[in-house]
Amino acid sequence: MQLEKYKIDEINQQQLADHKRKFEYVAEGINNLDDVLTKLEAFNVAIPSWALGTGGTRFGRFSGGGEPGSLEEKIEDVGVIQALNKSSNSISLHIPWDIPSNPSAIKALAAQVGLRFDAVNSNTFQNQKDQKYSYKFGSLHHVDKAVRQQAVEHNIEVIKYGVELGSNALSVWLADGSNFPGQLNFRGAFQNTLESLQEIYAALPDDWKVWVEYKPYEPNFYSTTIGDWGQSYLLASKLGQKAQTLVDLGHHLPNTNIEQIVSLLLMEGKLAGFHFNDSKYGDDDLTVGSINPYQLFLIFNELVEGMDARGMKHATDIGWMIDASHNLKDPIEDLIQSVEAIKIAYAQALIVDTAKLKAAQASNDTVQAQEILQQAYRTDVRALVAESRLRAGGALNPLATFRALDVRGNLIKERGATTVATGL
Ligand code: RM4
Ligand code: MN
Ligand code: MN
């Protein structure tokens, strides 16, 4: 289904007076208002094709109604999100979970709802149908050259799909690692990974990047071959300019200072982008901002400061993407919440008084530095985000509008109701 703009406008109309009051109140205290609104309007976050259905856990999956059954339907769902929030103008595919059988038709369909294709993701963490060699003991790091070769070829095939879709980045996440001490020679595994990535790197078109994602554990629990940002950075450095590190917020051990990692990667020109999510314990893949919104703000604060220091364009010089899984919530509602949380954190970072913060840092005024950051964080910027969305032609309140228009109800009518989950 496609959302008609006049319906969104009608609902906006009902909320306009209330919005205006809130907007004027917050706008008054902001010096760089036009700049903030323009930047917010330009800022988009890619939606992963795998987040539009119910994820589930290894203990079971409880699917919801009206879930998309095909790539075409997933594109439709991202189109709905984009129509509402005007901040989700691209989709990221995981191959072979979503194989575009006719890439040019898929590209055209996406364009119809205002979407383009973001990074393409390879998958060598599962065996695929008719695959010759098993990934049980890893893929790009495997001790057997033939297995590595198969995984390299898969990645090159993913690049080819990406080229046809108009994407310009390959995102690589490996499940490679070991479960037991002694299982693996760490240097051997790293060298094999590097060599495999070099072959993939050689197949990248000129204007492409490869994003190397890290993760400290799971599905392997003793070691992962690209376990942290240092290991990813080492690979990216050895590979060359087209390789950078991808930061997935859930891929850190508890209490890791992610904002510091981000700051240094950015300084080195090695920050590829983000997989946004939130977590309490590990790779929980929860709604962005649902557990630790302050950390998200601190990350954006480093991003804005670091990108400005390098003269980078906020909206396009870094890859912004959500990587989430939905077990309980309506996936579309959750994604709307996630994008909103990202934009709120971004808006708060944009209103930090940078000059004052620098002065506080230079005079070791710790108290003042904290005050400055928290002044921005505790400002209710939601009306700024809403105003930028209104100017872009979206909904003042995407979530409320999604519900008011009963989008899910309509999708259930079109695609069918809940299927009975099988589980333990
Ligand atoms: C991994 C990692 C990857 C994602 C898979 C599905 O934990 O976050 O980015 O593609 O999950
Ligand atoms: Mn990820
Ligand atoms: Mn993950």
Image (cartoon, grey):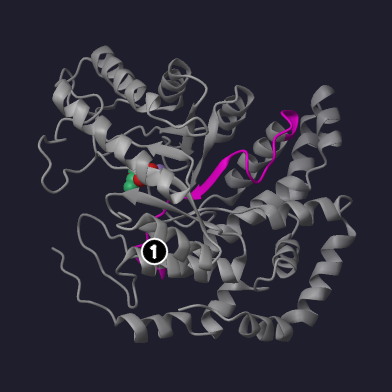
Residue 392 spot, x, y in % from top left:
71, 66
Residue 223 spot, x, y in % from top left:
27, 26
Looking at this view, is 24 or 373 the one in front? 24
Q: What secondary structure is the stretch in magenta mostly built from? A: loop
The quadrant where residue 155 appears: top left
Please state if 176 lies on the left or on the right of 90 as rendered: left
Query: Pointer 1: residues within 10 angstroms few (<14), some, or many (20+)?
Result: many
Residue 17 spot, x, y in % from top left:
80, 81
Q: Does 385 appear above or below 277?
A: below
Q: Residue at the spot x=12%, y=41% of the render? A: 131
Quadrant (top left/top right/bottom left/bottom right) for the N terminus: bottom left
> Cβ of disc 1 within 8 Å of ligand 1?
no
Looking at this view, is 189 or 118 the one in front? 118
Residue bounds of the magenta highlight: 308-330
Q: Dot 1 corresponds to which residue? A: 52
User: Is 313 covered by the magenta stretch?
Assistant: yes
Q: Residue at the spot x=21%, y=26% of the render? A: 148
- The answer to whether residue 377 of the structure is visible from this angle is no
